[in-house]
Image (cartoon, grey):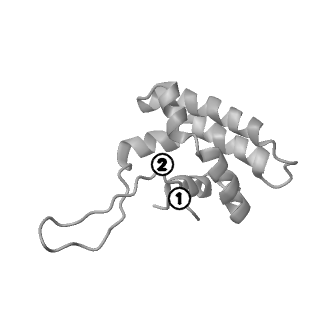
Amino acid sequence: MKRLIPLVIVATLSLVGAAIAQPQTRSLQGGDAEQAFTNDPNLHAFYDLSRAQLGKGAGALDFNDYQAKSFVLFRAMGAHMGMTPDQMQDHLKLIPGQMVQIVKEDPKVLDSYANFIAALVGPK
């Protein structure tokens, strides 16, 4: 499963001086912030929306509708995450398109909320 870069920040670390360490990937999210994000009822609603519009038995996707409904949920998440609605929407603006691609490549992402979260923020 792919990870969505806006939700998991990738950092390359190096040693100061002549020696350079091999690049390492680490999540800069984690902890309470990640827990608050994954427990947010609006994220659960985004999962439900994704299942309804991208999952098995869904009709033809109206991407503009999916994106607009996603943005409503993302904006509502802002207050819980210490951001304004505009900041949260801007932070997550690429997620609907990325989720469409991820589900196309791996429909099992929508089989459970745990699979969905792993696709969104990466495996634990």
Residue shown at the point (73%, 60%) measured from the top left:
104
The label number, if any, that marks residue 58 in the structure image: none
- Mark 1 touching mark 2, by CB under 8 A? yes
Q: Quadrant of the C terminus?
A: bottom left
Q: Is residue 106 above or below residue 5?
A: below
Amino acid at the residue labelled 1: Arg
Image coordinates of residue 49 in percent, x first then y, are: 72, 41
Badge 1 density bin: few <14, some 14–19, many ≥20, Cα 10 Å: some
- Tag 2 secondary structure: loop
| Residue carrying label 2 | 7
State the residue in front, 30 or 6: 6
Badge 2 density bin: few <14, some 14–19, many ≥20, Cα 10 Å: some
Amino acid at the residue labelled 2: Leu
Q: Is residue 55 above or below residue 33?
A: below
Residue 16: quadrant of the picture: bottom left
Residue 21 vs residue 5: left or right?
left
| Residue carrying label 1 | 3
Q: Is residue 34 above or below residue 15?
A: above
Residue shown at the point (53%, 59%) measured from the top left:
3
Image coordinates of residue 40 in percent, x first then y, are: 53, 36
